[in-house]
Each structure stands twice: as structure tokens, then as C-alpha cells.
Amino acid sequence: MKIEHELFAHHYLLTGDKDKAYKAAYPDASGEALKIAARRLVNHPDVRKYISERLAATQQEVVNRYHEEEQRLAE
């Protein structure tokens, strides 16, 4: 995956805003072209897979922390 795509994905995960994420990865982009490119990139198979994997990992981490806290409280 291109470094710009990974940067876009990271910013998208942080902000949930594909336009802001695209601007972070491609600072010279603007206007309608930015919006079109952001929409296209968020649906790119490699980017979509990366985002899904990171979300799943984060979700698993939260579940693990919850179970650890529940165990700690039970003891």
C-alpha cells in the first residue's frame, strides 16, 4: 500500500472524516476533486481492508481490557 494511502487510513480512523483524511495525506488537494478522490480512496480495496483490520484490532483490544477489568474487580 502506498504511504499516502496508509496515512489517509490512519487519519480516517482518527477523525472519521474522509475529506480531512485525504487532505492530511494529500495537502495540495482541494475542492470537488478532493471530495471525489477521498470517496474513491476510502473504497479502495487495500485501504478498506486496512481500515477494517485496524478497527477489528481496536475492538478486540477494548474487549480484552474490559475482561481484564472485570477479572480485577471480581478478585
Image: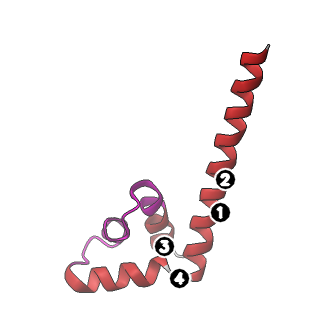
Which residue is the site of mark 2?
57
Label 2 vs label 4: CA separation? Answer: 20 Å
Whether tag 2 and tag 1 are in contact, CB under 8 A, the answer is yes
- Report x, y in % for residue 5: 48, 73
- Vertical position of residue 28 compared to residue 74: above or below: below
Neighbor class of circle 2 (other Cα within 10 Å; few <14, some 14-19, many 20+) is few
- Label 4 close to label 3 by CB (< 8 Å): yes
Q: Nearer the viewer, residue 51 or 74?
A: 74
Q: Position of residue 18 (x, y in %)?
A: 38, 70
Q: Earlier in the sequence, mark 4 or mark 3?
A: 3
Report how far apart the C-alphas of labels 1 and 3 lie in the structure: 15 Å
Callout 1: SS: helix
Q: Is residue 33 left or right of residue 18?
A: left
Quadrant of image for the C terminus: top right
Q: Amino acid at mark 1?
A: Glu
| Number of the label disc, if any, that sits on residue 44 | 4
Give the mark nearest the N terminus, 1 or 3: 3
In the drawing, what numbered circle is on residue 5?
Answer: 3
Q: Horizontal placement of 51 versus 72: left or right? A: left
Q: Amino acid at mark 3?
A: His
Q: How far apart in space, not on screen, are marks 4 and 1 (Cα)? A: 14 Å
- Asked if disc 4 and disc 1 are in contact, CB closer than 8 Å, the reply is no
Q: CA distance from mark 4 to mark 3?
A: 9 Å
Dot 4 amino acid type: His
- Segment tinted magenta in the rendering: 10-30
Q: Is residue 49 above or below residue 16?
A: below
Mark closer to the observer (1, 3): 1
**What residue does disc 1 label?**
53
- Judge whether 51 appears above or below 57 on screen: below
Q: Estimate the x, y position of residue 9 in percent, counting from the top left.
A: 49, 66
Question: Identity of the amino acid at label 2?
Answer: Ala
First in residue order: circle 2 vs circle 4: 4
